[in-house]
Amino acid sequence: MSILREHISLFLVPTPIGNLEDITLRALNILKSVDGILAEDTRTSGVLLKHYQIETRMHAFHAFNEHRFLEKIIERLKNGEKLAVITDAGTPGISDPGYLLVRECLKNGLQVECLPGPTAFVPALVNSGFACDSFIFDGFLPQKKGRQTAFKKMATEERTMIIYESPHRLIKALEQMKEFLGEERRVSVSRELTKIFEETITGTVAEVLAYFSSKTIKGEIVIVVEGNTTKGREDYE
């Protein structure tokens, strides 16, 4: 008996952000049962599939070819195939390919199901100790145009903020936070989540900047920024 629900055409399957044991049993069963897997990087995903002895055929589906293959994929789904989407790590569509395909599926009356599973910003947020009841996720900030504007907006935001950053731009990001948010604003930087060298460093911008300035920075980075806790008080003064 198939575990795939008859009316679902496309499955978005979260994959581990580091530790291969963080995948769910349901995710494994779906990856074994679908007709094909759309993978952001077939080499990276191949390690995961080989580890769990999954032989389902993979097809490359990433930011550089998703527009070109959308129509073909929709046609396959209309013909009755069931496909799964996976990315290098985490949940498809969260700063990764997946959004465009989901949108096209819905436009064509094809039903989509996203499984629950790993997303890097959730453990980083909880580990920070900052307010989790109201927060915003901005993904990757612009590298050039619009970057300063983004930091200026962050300076007045009262909710907890979460962004992704590459290792080689972490110091620059912290320096810009020091400039626009002030050196006393509290931040939390998580890297290598779920991996052997996982660490989370929390403190003022000045403290966290000093810590990473003396380190060789590797791994995926999640920055959590405490909201502007003084703004509300200033409005009443």
Image (cartoon, helix red, strand yellow):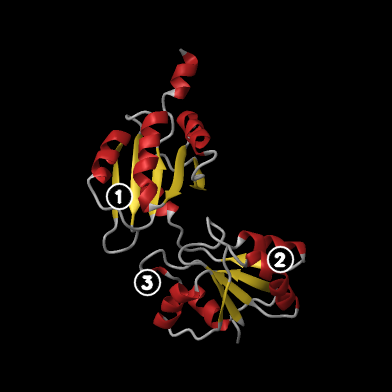
SS type, badge 3? helix
Please tell me whether mark 1 or mark 3 is closer to you in this view.
1
Count of picture labels? 3
Q: What residue type is labelled 3?
A: Glu
Q: What residue type is labelled 1?
A: Thr
Question: In the shown orientation, is residue 163 left or right of residue 78?
Answer: left
SS type, badge 1? strand
Q: Where is residue 179 in the image (x, y as percent from the top left)?
A: 39, 30
Please tell me whether mark 3 or mark 2 is closer to you in this view.
2
Q: Where is residue 5 in the image (x, y as percent from the top left)?
A: 65, 76
Q: Mark 3 points at which residue?
A: 21
Q: Is residue 143 above or below residue 94?
A: above
**The C terminus, quarter of image:** top left
Q: How far apart are marks 3 and 2 (CA)?
A: 30 Å
The answer to the question of whether label 1 and label 3 lie on touching residues, with beta carbons closer than 8 A, is no
SS type, badge 2? helix
Q: What mark, if any, has residue 81 been given in the picture?
A: none
Q: Which amino acid does label 2 sit on?
A: Cys
